[in-house]
Amino acid sequence: MERAVGEIVAQARAADPEVEVIDLVPGALEPGRLAELTSPSLFGGGKVLVLRSAQDLGKDLIAEVLDYAKRPAEDVVLAAVHHGGAKGKALVEGLTKLKARKIACPKITKMGDRIAFVREEIRRSGGKVSQDAARSLIDAVGTDLRELAAACSQLVADTGGKVDDAAVARYYRGRAEVSGFTVADKAIEGQLADALEQLRWALATGVAPVLIVSALAQGVRGLAKVGGAPRGARGAALAKELGMPPWKIERVQRQLRGWSGNGVARALSVVAEADAQVKGGAADPVYALEKAVADIVAARAIR
């Protein structure tokens, strides 16, 4: 929503750099105040009125907003921010009938949508980013869209537009705990040095060895599941068949390009052995994890 409001303000300022932006909230908006703010001024100048939490307006104020919308002032832009739901529905319906511009701001809850958001933000800033690097940025920064948008803009400025895993690691490593899945991804992709570095970082930040070996196991089993899927299955049908989200299937399919069936079988044996060692079979679980990571990377080379 903030992005939509920002774009409206930017458009108004492009036409009039001196435009005044006024935030209004229902609790402080008295009857007649809107008419006062939208009436011609002796000093001239445009205005952008941002009506926050418009769903909380009472009947009288909704009527006042709709009455203004029927005959809007040329130098005043009114942006009503409605958070959805049935509350205040009369305002939305009334403005829709009056042909007001409507900007939908659906909630982003799925990882695939967040990845798409990051890629679009970086594209808007003049850069490019792969799907994997976008996911790495989300893992590092978190899911708050405002923080992600700021990080995207900063990364493009810092890198000149090419945003990859290395850039994300360079600027955002340490902002979030490294998870076992980060270690697993690096190992499965054959990046031994990075996998061991991420493993040590994960252990240093308190990630339990049993969680790391679990992530390694899930990653390797993902290779086996996707690699053994029916050849003709795709999209939603494949996701349903495997019980995995589409974005994860796409990621595993890319990872599979460096693997053979024999290599995956060897990696499955490695994670089974590591699981037993971490759960009491080895005197040094850290060494057991390091060996497992190295053995998984080696298994990738088996043909």
Image (tube, grey):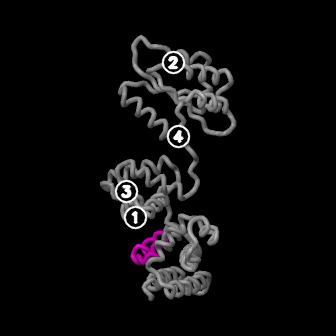
Q: Residues within 10 Å of mark 2 (few under 14, many from 20)?
A: few
Residue type at numbered disc 3: Lys
Earlier-in-chain disc, 2 versus 1: 2
- Identify the mark at residue 128; answer none if there is no mark: 3
Name the secondary structure under disc 2. helix
Kindly indicate whether the residue at mark 1 contacts the one at mark 3 (C-beta within 8 angstroms).
no
Name the secondary structure under disc 3. strand
Q: Measured from the top left, where is residue 117 in percent x and y?
A: 48, 52
Tell me how far mark 4 sits from mark 3, CA to CA. 24 Å
Write down the residue under mark 1. Answer: 165
Residue type at numbered disc 4: Met
Task: State the residue in front, 183 or 283.
Answer: 183
Write down the residue under mark 2. Answer: 37
**Residue 165 picture quarter:** bottom left
Q: Is 219 left or right of 132, judged from the image as shown?
A: right
Task: Report the magenta residues as a range.
Answer: 185-203
- Identify the mark at residue 1; answer none if there is no mark: 4
Q: Measured from the top left, where is residue 240 in percent x and y?
A: 64, 68
